[in-house]
Amino acid sequence: MLTWFHSLMDARGGQNFLAHLDHLDRHEGPAPWGNDPPAFVPEPDARPLGQRGRIAGGSRAYMRGLAPVPPVSPATSLRPPGRACFRQESFLAPELGADDRRAAREMTWRLAVVGKAMAELWQRRGLPDTPFLLPISVDLRPKGDAGATFGKVLAFHFARFRPSDTGDLPVLARALRRQMAEAVRGGQIEANAVAMEFLRYCPPRAMLRALPWTKDGELFSFNCADLTEWPSALAHCFGRRVLNAYHVPVVPPRPGIGVFFNRCGSRNNIVVSWIEGVVNEGEAARIIEVVRDALGWIRTP
């Protein structure tokens, strides 16, 4: 079992760092990054500061109108927060045709499925049919490129849908896909990425004060991310074959819960991460079961 904390990098950067350490441990053999030297930090943005400031201003304007009705979460009334908890289970995916396999691996489909599980939790808690609001991380590294190790090479897209929208998952998945496409076309993802760079100079609390829907302390409804495949370069690590690997993000006290995916070989991992008091073990297990059932995954032996 390997455990590491990576406050100075995103999850892909954490995997890169592990590959660097594994290469140093072997002292021989090909480096995981090929013949070119690794990129430890992202290239600086070459655009003038004023231009980047205008782009980041577009992100702030977008965020201000993002949630006319403040979001709620299971942690809305939780004070003080408890310890961090998680539950992980592995599954096998059924054999699918190419089109079905591609659809099943789309983040928008998985987000719709997680929304269904959360809608059930909302119903049990008597929470209103207020639109879910949640950040979806967008990896800015070129596809197939290991990219930088240190620094958050991410932007964010903010998905929005009501708990009641989860009754028809295919329709919801298409709507979420359209949201993402419109965010790309409208430059919102680029603006959010530039705004994150400006947080180096501006404390996050200052940004939150500018967002009317965070005044009560609620940031989002829940978290969700898919780390996709465990890198082939790490199929063997520190002299041992990797049987399974999964990521356990610690979610903020509010919303206090998130669902995360990744794959390692034939294993599909689901991790529910929560803050003690937000849900209990049985509720976390139910979230996993709803997601597993909707995806058609099979429990591993």
Image (cartoon, helix red, strand yellow):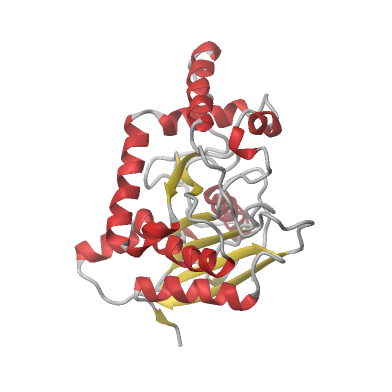
Q: Is residue 245 visible?
A: no
Q: Could you say where residue 58 lies in the image, as x and y percent from the top left? A: 48, 23
Name the residue nearer the viewer: 18 or 252: 252
Identify the image quadrant of residue 284. bottom right
- Outermost residue to the bottom: 301
Residue beneath the point at 28% across and 56% down: 171
Q: Is residue 219 visible?
A: yes
Q: Could you say where residue 134 lies in the image, as x and y percent from the top left? A: 51, 48
- Outermost residue to the right: 80
Residue beneath the point at 70% across and 56% down: 77
- In the rendered image, which quarter contains the N terminus? bottom right
Query: How many dots with numbers?
Result: 0
Residue 16 higher or lower than 279, as above or below: above
Residue beneath the point at 35% across and 42% down: 179
Q: Could you say where residue 213 lies in the image, as x and y percent from the top left? A: 59, 38
Residue 1 higher or lower than 208, as above or below: below
Residue 223 higher or lower than 240, as above or below: above
Residue 290 higher or lower than 156, as above or below: below
Name the residue nearer the viewer: 12 or 211: 211
Q: Could you say where residue 105 lies in the image, as x and y percent from the top left? A: 34, 61
